[in-house]
Image (cartoon, helix red, strand yellow):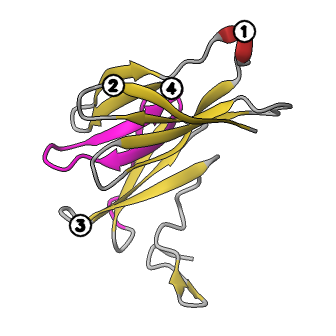
C-alpha cells in the first residue's frame, strides 16, 4: 500500500505508515487543513494533511491523552497524564494549567486523563481512566475559561 491510501467501504486510509500504540482523539483543523491525533502510550501528538502527506509526530514527554483546538490562539488545550495544559508546536511549548489529581486514599496510582473535548461554551471536559479498576474511581472534570477545574460528575467504573 502506498501513501495514496486504500478505500474500504467508502473509508480511505490516508496514513498507512502511521502506527500508534494507543491512537485516539482525532481533531480536524479547518484553518490549516490538518488532521491531528494522539498516541497516548507513546506520548505523541501526530499530524498530517488531508491527503496523508506531511506526516509528523511530536514527542510531548508524557502521555498525552486528548486535545482540542484553541479558538483564537495557535495550539491546543490538552489532557496530559494527570494535568490540563496548553500545547503549541514549532517550537514545542507546554504550559500546565491545572492538576487532575484525586486523593491517593480514594484513587490508585495508575490513573490518567482519558478522552476530552471542549463544549460550545469553550469549557474543556476530560474524563479520567484507571487500568483494571475494581470499583468506581474515575471522574469527569470541567476546566473553564477562568482557570477553575471542577470535579463535575462521578465516580464511574
Q: CA distance from mark 2 to mark 3?
A: 29 Å
Residue 153: % across, % down: 57, 37
**Helix, strand or loop at disc 4?**
loop
Mark 2 or mark 4, which is nearer the start of the sequence? 4
Residue 155: % across, % down: 67, 33
Mark 1 or mark 4, which is nearer the start of the sequence? 4
Disc 4 vs disc 1: Cβ atoms closer than 8 Å?
no
- Which residue is farthest top? 105
Q: CA distance from mark 1 to mark 3?
A: 44 Å
Specify the label residue 105 is tagged with. Answer: 1
Q: Is residue 19 left or right of residue 132?
A: left
Q: Quadrant of the N terminus?
A: bottom right
**Badge nearest the viewer, 3 or 4:** 3
Q: Is residue 76 left or right of residue 154?
A: left
Name the residue at 33% across, 38% down: 77
Q: Is residue 97 above or below residue 131?
A: above
Q: CA distance from mark 4 to mark 1?
A: 24 Å
Residue picked out by circle 4:
62
Residue picked out by circle 2:
148
**CA neighbours of label 4 inside 10 A, class few (<14), some (14 to 19), many (20+):** some
Q: CA distance from mark 4 to mark 2?
A: 23 Å
Amino acid at each position: 500500500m502506498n501513501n495514496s491510501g486504500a478505500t474500504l467501504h467508502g473509508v480511505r486510509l490516508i496514513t498507512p505508515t502511521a502506527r500508534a500504540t494507543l491512537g485516539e482523539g482525532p481533531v480536524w483543523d479547518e484553518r490549516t487543513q490538518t488532521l491531528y491525533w494522539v498516541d497516548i502510550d507513546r506520548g505523541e501528538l501526530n499530524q498530517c494533511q488531508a491527503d496523508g502527506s506531511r506526516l509528523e509526530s511530536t514527542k510531548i514527554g508524557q502521555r498525552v491523552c486528548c486535545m482540542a483546538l484553541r479558538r483564537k490562539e495557535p495550539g491546543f488545550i490538552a489532557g496530559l497524564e494527570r494535568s490540563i495544559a496548553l500545547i503549541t508546536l514549532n517550537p514545542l511549548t507546554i504550559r500546565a494549567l491545572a492538576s487532575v489529581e484525586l486523593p491517593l486514599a480514594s484513587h490508585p496510582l495508575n490513573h490518567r486523563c482519558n478522552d476530552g473535548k471542549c463544549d460550545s461554551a469553550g469549557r474543556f471536559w476530560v474524563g479520567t481512566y484507571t487500568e483494571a479498576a475494581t470499583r468506581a474511581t474515575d471522574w469527569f472534570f470541567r476546566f473553564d475559561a477562568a482557570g477553575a477545574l471542577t470535579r463535575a460528575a462521578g465516580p464511574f467504573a
